[in-house]
Image: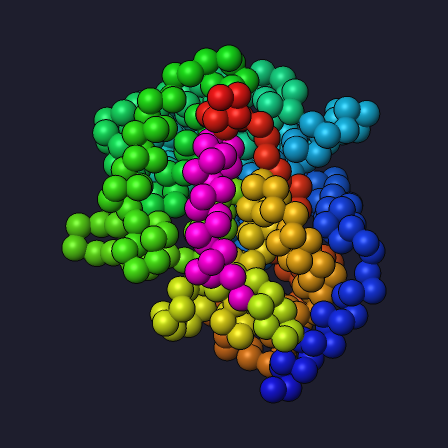
Amino acid sequence: MRLAALLMIALVAAAAEPVDPAAEVARRLETTFDRLLADPEAYQATVLQKCRGFPEGGLFPFTFPAIAYAVLAQGDRQRAPQRLASAALCLDRAMGVVARKVEAPGGDLARLADYRQHATYIGQLALALGVWRLAGGDDRYEAVHARLHSVLLDALVAARGDQLRSFPTYAWTFDTIPCLAALRLRDRVRGESTADAAIREHLAWVASEGVDAATELPASIVEPGKRAPPRGCDLSLRVAMLAQVDHGAARALWQRYVVVHWCERATMAGFREYPPGVNRPGDPDSGPILQGIGMSATGLGIAAARAIEDRAIATRLTGQLPAIATLHKLLVAADPGAARRTLGGAGNDPDYVTGFLFGDACMFFCVTWRDLGTALDASE
């Protein structure tokens, strides 16, 4: 009850913040990353130190800010050169991270023969490179971008609609979706349709093989002999990515997701990490779960709502943003064990808008992401 009361105080205080909290948070986050990237090598060292406890903690602190800067550049041509320069600093380091992760020949991603069963790392980097080009970035990464597109497309065609492997040892159904978005972005930039058939084949596989019968939402894991229920962290980011591929499918998924996972509490609103009736503790993917609401699902839900253009939910979620650092601080104080388990050991650091570096990287993406106009059905 004490934590609930403190949450209420924090959220009431947030109501007095700026009318457009998403724009204000984006401004503060851009200022934060401008400062951090003034010394790129120091930033890389900080990422290794502060983000290693998070899933993809060595990747997202580079790809998410790169995407955010590129999207901002697309919306403001006067500041585009500066923002694209910042995106490039992030992309340069992301490429090194991915090359090491997938053990690229000679450390050169342009020499990859296949995706090495690393859809997570290859797909997220290819997506960031696609947004870079869509925003007017030059062709300095073309050799790598072309190769990533090729190996992902080859893998999807070979899979005959089935999911790709997130990592060599396992697969989350979500991780193929950013690959589809990456393929679609590059095709759109180049005026091609090389991946259309493979994209549609995978979406058909999800509809026929990947849906949880109880909720009619995509299952988080679909493996021989193993299925796992839908998860909010997956579904929020899935909608955000799918909107760039098939807007109609993304909207239909969003509507069902809201029916099953949306929660309104006295203290806050957001998305459940698990469907009603599934009670599991938080983990590094979900982030903290407060009153049944998952912090990752809710934060990433901002990106989904913006991409799907659901202004009501986007406004509801972004209205809580000014309280995010306070919420983090309260969680760490109220349940240090849960904070260690779900926040990768991150404390409440006043240098960061959300209280921790990984949170800032994710939130920078969320408050800038939108419908990029690349979906297959955008012009149909």
Q: Quadrant of residue 176?
A: top left
Q: Is residue 181 visible?
A: no
Foreground pick, 213 / 142: 213
Side of 23 relative to 59 (left or right): right
Q: Is residue 67 visible?
A: yes
- Residue 171: x percent and y percent? 30, 47
Side of 159 relative to 52 (left or right): left
**Residue at the left extreme, as displayed:** 225
Q: Is residue 206 above or below residue 159?
A: below
**Residue at the bottom extreme, as displayed:** 1
Q: Does the magenta stretch mainly form a helix, a strand or a loop?
A: helix
Task: Give the magenta range.
Answer: 243-263
Q: Is residue 25 above or below residue 160?
A: below
- Residue 373: x percent and y percent? 58, 27
Q: How is the rendered protein coloured?
A: rainbow
* Residue appearing at x 49%, y 21% in the figure: 380
Find out whether residue 330 is within the magenta segment: no
Q: Quadrant of the N terminus?
A: bottom right
Foreground pick, 352 / 368: 368
**Residue at the top extreme, as displayed:** 191
- Residue 201: x percent and y percent? 30, 29
Find out whether residue 259 is within the magenta segment: yes
* Residue appearing at x 41%, y 31% in the figure: 180
